[in-house]
Image (cartoon, rainbow, N blue to C red):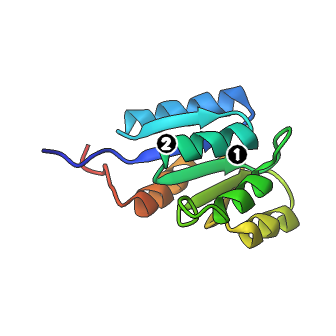
Amino acid sequence: MPPKPSTVLIVEDDTVTRFWLERRLSRRGYNVFTAQDGESGLNQARQHTPDVILTDIFMPGMNGTEMIKCIRSDSILNHTPILAMTAAYNYVKEEAITAGANDVFDKPLDFDLLLSKIEGLAGMSYSNQ
């Protein structure tokens, strides 16, 4: 029996980016859940306990940095790898790392680099497909 596919939660307020990431990761065999802001992302994380969380930083309502802090203080989710995405300045990236993100990626995204990091964190590789 093949291994259970890893689950990725995408938290992104931009519909086009969210759909693009969901589609590309789904095609590679990941189970993908999405949310459009930090609050719904936190709820989705609690509901699905993803293997990796991919979040934008600047979003309306609860932003990505606030969501990361909440996840890091949650006894069930606190070890979940979190990758942040932003087109912002270096200090914003530093804030995300300080909050608990494992890494921060610049927008526009280099999907191959992002996928490599997700594969490493999720413990799976689809390079043979």
At 48% from the left and 49% from the top, the residue drawn is: 50
Instruction: Give percent across and percent down for residue 67.
Output: 73, 53
> Residue furthest toward the front?
75
Relative horizontal placement of residue 102, taking residue 93 as reference (left or right): left
Instruction: Give percent across and percent down for residue 82.
Output: 60, 59
- Say what secondary structure mark 2 lies in: helix
Mark 1–mark 2 CB contact (< 8 Å): no
At 75% from the left and 34% from the top, the residue drawn is: 13
Q: Quadrant of residue 34?
A: top right
At 39% from the left and 41% from the top, the residue drawn is: 30
List the residue tagged with mark 2: 48
First along the sequence among labels 1 and 2: 2
Label 2 amino acid?
His
Instruction: Give percent across and percent down for residue 80.
Output: 53, 61
Q: CA distance from mark 1 to mark 2?
A: 27 Å
Label 1 amino acid?
Pro
List the residue tagged with mark 1: 108
Quick one: 103 or 4, which is closer to the camera?
4
Depth check, mark 1 against mark 2: the one in front is 2
